[in-house]
Amino acid sequence: MSENKEIEQNLEESDPLLENEAVLRRMMKVEAEIKRAEADIKASEKKIQQIKQSNTWKRTGKARKLFSRTRPPHKELTELEKEVISLQDEIHTLSDTLESLKLQQEQFNYNRIWRMVREMKDEGDIVDSLEKMISQKQIEDANYTHVIHSAARLFMKDKEAYRKLVYPKLFEGLKIEDIPEFMVRSGFSEDQIPLEQAASFRASLTMRMREHQLRGTLPEMVLDDKQTAYQFAKNLDVRTPEISVRTYTFDEIPEQSGIAIKPVDGAGARGVYLVYENDDIIDIKQSKEIANWQVLRKDMERDLIAGRVLQDEWFTEELILEDKNTKTPARDIKFYCFYGKVGLILEIVRYPELKYCWWTASGERVATGKYGESLFKGKGVSQDELELAKAISLEIPAPFIRIDFLRSDTGLVFGEFTPKPGNYDEFDTPTDKWLGDYFLDAQGRLTADLLNGKQFLHFKNLTSGGSID
């Protein structure tokens, strides 16, 4: 008991030790071992008393005394100890083998899962099979959640230091909607337990899109229209490229030089072509050169047939170059903005090779779980460019919007607003939690500004009737 008291005393006297996971783990283990030992001692003492009080024990007292003086040491005990050690070794070996088999099975799943699903679809069984798998997963998820909840309840009234160790780990194993109220309550205690695991950019953005379905529109979705976005940027004195006043079918586009051709409803550079001259054209998405307009129109038609572009509606805009002398296409600079704050910056070079670079607002390169196979060391952004993105986002009454620019030889040129970035679910867990905190903080600051009477005049002037219902 003395070792346990010493550890507990150290925890009480020194705050830094509260964060020392190794000490807390050791203390928990010691306490558990003590409780088991005490229980074993009590059980043994009880058993001894029962034996001593039995008639058999009383009748054989003299015989036992005589036998204890004359019998040799028993070898059975040594043999049993050897057997236990052997079994323990066998268990360790089997555990290692099991882990190896699990890894092989995971690799099998990774390599075969697509083929399995494809076969299910081809055989017409995919709906029934999915229903069974989903039902099984729901049962497993429910059982798993009950286990985590039960573990959390065991520590509800335990030492604060223990809860600070255990609860964050349990948070990691729970979906946001499965976190019980009593664990959330611990975040509001005198010694708060952080709730950062409850934040999620993925969840926040998905809920925002559900809100869009329920409400019919959201402020940021108004800016998803290219023409509206350009007008809003111009009202804020942000440079925009010159664009065509009308849209075209692929065979109607006028044969001009110094233009970029883009689909009205496109993303990820699909269907984007840069026309330097009539015989000098680049397909940005596929990183290839196109000989002339005749070939270009055939490629645009193939974009429609293949589904890379959904509708035969295109517009042209001024060709923005990073270096006119070398005809270097403008790189993309995308700011992940959270109502006046920038969480992430994505820098993209699309030609001749597609490459990505992630930055924080403080100018540090980071990995996010996305595009890991195509990362490069980019140029980053200046403080003035960062402040421009912040200022624009403060004019939009929404907790999040991505603001996309092209980098020209004279600075940033506005590209578009992106309320819902593609594949936002692919961020790794640390990035998802980090951006989730940005989202929640932005919601709070936006609500405070609205309560304090902020008008968002530039945005209201853009919308009919001066408001968004």
Image (cartoon, rainbow, N blue to C red):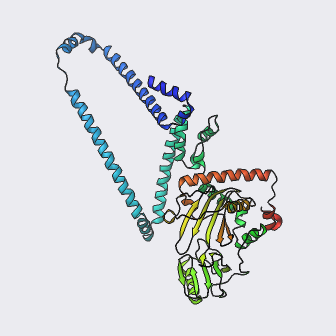
- Whether residue 48 sits left or right of residue 233 in the image: it is left
Q: Residue at x 58, y 75 (%)?
A: 270
- Whether residue 32 sits left or right of residue 262 in the image: it is left
**Residue 452 seen by the camera:** yes
Q: Position of residue 286 (x, y in %)?
A: 53, 77
Q: Position of residue 464 (x, y in %)?
A: 81, 68
Quadrant containing the N terminus in the rendered view: top left
- Whether residue 329 sits left or right of residue 118 in the image: it is right
Of residues 104 and 400, the one drawn nearer to the viewer in this rendering: 400
**Residue 218 seen by the camera:** no
Residue 422 vertical placement versus 322 (above, below): above
Quadrant containing the C terminus in the rendered view: bottom right
Of residues 66 and 277, the one drawn nearer to the viewer in this rendering: 277
Residue 467 vertical placement versus 86 (above, below): below
Q: Position of residue 124 (x, y in %)?
A: 45, 69
Q: Determine which quarter of the picture holds residue 267.
A: bottom right
- Report the number of numbered marks: 0
Of residues 262 and 95, the one drawn nearer to the viewer in this rendering: 262
Residue 370 vertical placement versus 449 (above, below): below
Q: Position of residue 130 (x, y in %)?
A: 47, 61
